[in-house]
Amino acid sequence: MSRIIHKEQLSKDVFLMRLEAPLIAEERKAGQFIILQTDEDLGERIPLTIADADEDEGSITIIFQVVGKSTNDLSHLNKGDDIPVLVGPLGMPTHIENFGTVVCVGGGIGVAPLHPIAQALKKAGNKVITIIGARNKDLIILEDKMKEIADEFIVCTDDGSYGRKALVTEPLKEICKREEKPNMAIAIGPPVMMKFCAETTRPYEVFTQVSLNTIMVDGTGMCGGCRVNVGGEVKFVCVDGPEFDGHKVDFDNMMMRLNSYKDFEKKKAHECNLELEVAKKEAEL
């Protein structure tokens, strides 16, 4: 069991929570994740990357987007509420060393799992160039935290409402074309964004690491739902990853499989909203 000690809303459907978890805070490494359930008996297992940790406070930070019933249920918990099941740290940690210059690219909610990785890379002595992007200004998250880490910082929005009007691949390409190209790139965000980041760096032979955490289901490798093709081999994201060589990932196959869950998630989110409306009406009677 873990108590919520802080909650805030970062954008329309994105929430940040700090959870009481001293052992996880002590053991976690960049790139690892936790699994939680809002109902011990019936709740869906939700895998979420550890966005930050505070050993002194004994807490970990999670950031999540409401996409279905389970994350909607989680978003309605508040400070002081308990989460009955919290397990972690899980997954293979990010390999951290002094590579030289690393470009960290985050799209939307992907900035959350990118934060501890960029933090660890900077601590290891790397020059960190950070690009974060979203559809519009309201969806930009963790700007101040990412800016603190970065030696060079770029914000992009699709509609030009903030920062540079561009997709994140545009400044990424410009950086790869520099006389001293980066030694490595890390891209985390929607699968289509990671796919095109990998295609952008491919001609310049810049090794590009991606995090496929969006496809995880149970987080233990038992369900097989997170299998992906990497370099012609089947990998399970939750136990073999979540990070892989972006130039070897079959993104088209991954996105096809992810899309098969969308109608179900929308249905569950709709059902949950109906439940909330009914409860609201009953409370008014």
Image: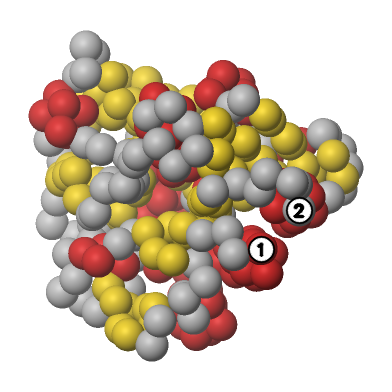
The residue that disc 2 covers is: 177
Residue 94, position in %: x, y?
32, 47
Q: Quadrant of residue 47?
A: bottom left
Q: Secondary structure at mark 1?
A: helix
Q: CA distance from mark 1 to mark 2?
A: 8 Å
Q: Quadrant of residue 64?
A: top left
Q: Amino acid at mark 1?
A: Tyr
- Name the disc covering residue 204, or none: 1
Query: Can residue 10 be seen here?
Result: no
* Mark 1 in CB contact with mark 2 (< 8 angstroms): yes
Q: Nearer the viewer, residue 285 or 63?
A: 63
Q: Nearer the viewer, residue 204 or 15?
A: 204
Q: For the point 68% across and 44% down, which residue is it? A: 180
Residue 9, position in %: x, y?
54, 30
- Name the disc covering residue 256, or none: none
Q: Amino acid at mark 2?
A: Lys
The N terminus sits in image quarter: top left
